[in-house]
Amino acid sequence: MKHDVVLIPGDGIGPEVTVAVKQIFEAAAVDVRWHEHQAGIAALAETNEVLPDSTLEAIQRYHVALKGPCTTPVGGGFTSVNVALRKRLNLYAAVRPVVSLPGVTTRFENVDLIVIRENTEGLYSGVENQVTEGVVMSMKVATEAACSRIARWAFRFATQRKRKKITCFHKANIMKITDGLFLRCARQIHEYDYPNIDYQEMIVDAGCMKLVQDPTQFDVLLLENLYGDVVSDLCAGLVGGLGVVPGANIGDDRAVFEAVHGSAPDIAGKGIANPLALLMSGVMMLDYLADTRSDRACREAALRITQAYRQALSEGQTTRDLGGSLSTMEFARAVIERLSN
Ligand code: NAD
């Protein structure tokens, strides 16, 4: 079965890590037909728009995309393409597995967490205004529909994956109405529909402290948009950094897979970025195709690629962010050499 997949290289290190992942997919004989489209700065240069309709239409047509990072200017300029893409396509659930890897030594062993982040509202509503000179405001939006939808998604996901516990991080002691609604929805879904999963609540600041003390006490984390963004990067630090944490943005009938990391302008163009986070996102995409289209070949390819990169890591084949010396393409070749037939 051939799968049509939209490929958005992005900018910064995006094109470099995308080429590496494409080569590994090709070597693994993954049956995908890439449809390349642009977003962000790369699209601006070509079409004068940061999120061209043709990119959105392609994802709507093919339902699945693999995306590199897109830069968002700080403190001005265009609004985030990444946020716009998730909102316009209603990709409401961000899923980020954070797992210890062989050969990647960190303070902790056996980290196995899944961060689930609400992807469409909260402080990412984009509603900011100036009330008067020197007074500005940002609107945090929470709707019962979106809070219940992400809670239901998280409990269903945890049940399907045989996970045991969901911890909801919040700040409802301060944001009593918005975070209060997020908590109320999670409690209801747990109580009425998923009593099989343990459910726990934690104030986000205390939760962060506990995460860095002992992440193995957590299983699945459920967070609203901003906390999910921040805590994802914190969790990446527990397992070796942003070079090893993949992600998916999932809606009801479409999904965009992308690493948690951004465009890394400090190392862009040097050929040293770790392509593993995007590769792992590609593996999540293959599993999604296997699940949604009953294609066993995708599952097998996902497994072969996973075995190959795990073997490469355990043999000390790593990029600089993990203490090694390999370039982006040297690491890709190390994975390709270890692909089983
Ligand atoms: P970043 O994730 O790009 O980089 C943070 C640090 O991690 C940097 O030191 C970088 O070199 C390192 N790093 C990240 N990915 C790496 C990799 N694959 N291999 C090796 N090292 C890696 O975060 P930032 O610098 O805060 O953001 C840069 C830009 O990316 C900003 O414009 C931001 O808005 C954007 N961004 C985009 C996305 C996305 O496209 N989904 C996500 C996050 C940030």
Image: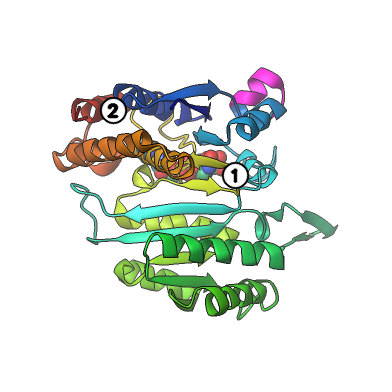
Whether 134 is drawn above or below 339: the answer is: below
Q: Which residue is mark 2?
A: 332
Residue type at tag 2: Ala
Q: Residue shown at 47%/39% (left/top)?
A: 293
Asked whether 187 or 324 is in front, the reply is: 187
Classify mark 1: helix, strand or loop.
loop
Image coloring type: rainbow
Task: Of the two numbered discs 2 and 1 on the same chain, state the one appearing first in sequence.
Answer: 1
Locate the N terminus by quadrant: top left
Whether 255 is drawn above or below 327: the answer is: below
Q: Position of residue 230 (x, y in %)?
A: 50, 58
Q: For residue 1, say whether it is visible.
A: yes
Locate the C terminus by quadrant: top left
Give the Cα distance between marks 2 and 1. 31 Å
Q: Position of residue 168 (x, y in %)?
A: 50, 71
The image quadrant of residue 120 is: bottom right
Q: Residue shown at 47%/30% (left/top)?
A: 14
Q: Which residues are magenta?
A: 42-49
Which secondary structure class fits the magenta region best? Answer: helix
Number of residues whose C-alpha sits closer than 10 Å to that of mark 1, classed few (under 14), some (14–19) or many (20 or more): few
Q: Position of residue 265 (x, y in %)?
A: 47, 34
Q: For residue 274, say whether it is visible.
A: no
Asked whether 255 or 253 is in front, the reply is: 253
Q: Which residue is mark 1?
A: 253
Q: Is residue 153 magenta?
A: no
Classify mark 2: helix, strand or loop.
helix
The image quadrant of residue 225 is: bottom right
Front tag of 2 and 1: 1
